Amino acid sequence: MSLVVNSNNRVMSGLRSILSFVLVLVTVFLVSCSSPQASVPTTYSPEKIEQLQVLVEPISEAREKMSVLKDFIADENWIDTRTYIHGPLGGLRQQMNNLTRSLLSKDQKTASDLAKDLFNRFERIDAAAKDRNGVAAENQFRQAVRDFDGFLDLIPKSSSVS
């Protein structure tokens, strides 16, 4: 009688293993067939452009106010130069990072690189102001404006904006 019980246990154990394996195969098949691949957009929709315009507004305003920094550098007003970089331009990094994450993936790396370059320039302007080096500050300012403009040029414009 014990021989029959042991043989039934081995058969049941083997059937459980086979059943488990079949269930795993069915699950893998169903999961692989059920999840559609999300396509990455390659163009900006009008709604996305509107969203980007909201995000770019404070960044554009900061760009328009770069003339204030230029005047501080030209006047060799080093205290206000450093204060302006850390004060009114202090939140710019976060705003640019938020905007960069909202861009299409094809534009994100370029935008991120330009933003990093811009903030490296701000750090160099700050260091030049600390050292009272007008030539270095003016040179870094010109390059910062170039990086800033390059970043803003990546942002698509609404067709209704002229």
Image (spheres, helix red, strand yellow):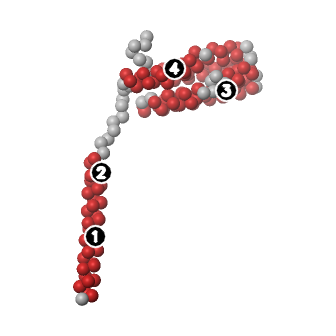
Which secondary structure, mark 3? helix
The residue singled out by tag 3 in the image is 86
Vertical relation: 8 (above or below) 123: below
Which secondary structure, mark 4? helix
Q: Which mark is residue 31?
A: 2
Q: How far apart in space, not on screen, are marks 2 and 4 (Cα)?
A: 44 Å
Residue placed at 48% from the left, 22% from the top?
Answer: 54
- The mark nearer the N terminus, 3 or 4, is 4
- The mark nearer the N terminus, 4 or 1, is 1
The residue singled out by tag 4 in the image is 57
| 92 left or right of 83 in image | left
- The mark nearer the N terminus, 2 or 3, is 2
Report if residue 136 is visible in the image: no
Amino acid type assigned to the residue bearing label 1 in the image: Arg
| 142 left or right of 152 in image | right
Amino acid type assigned to the residue bearing label 4 in the image: Glu
116 or 62: nearer the eye? 62
Which secondary structure, mark 1? helix
Whether pointer 1 and pointer 3 mark residues with C-beta atoms closer than 8 Å, the reply is no
Q: Which mark is residue 16?
A: 1
Whether pointer 3 and pointer 4 mark residues with C-beta atoms closer than 8 Å, the reply is no
Amino acid type assigned to the residue bearing label 2 in the image: Val
Q: Which mark is residue 67?
A: none
Residue 109 spot, x, y in % from top left: 48, 32
Q: How far apart in space, not on screen, are marks 1 and 3 (Cα)?
A: 68 Å
| 68 left or right of 25 in image | right
Q: How far apart in space, not on screen, are marks 1 and 2 (Cα)?
A: 22 Å
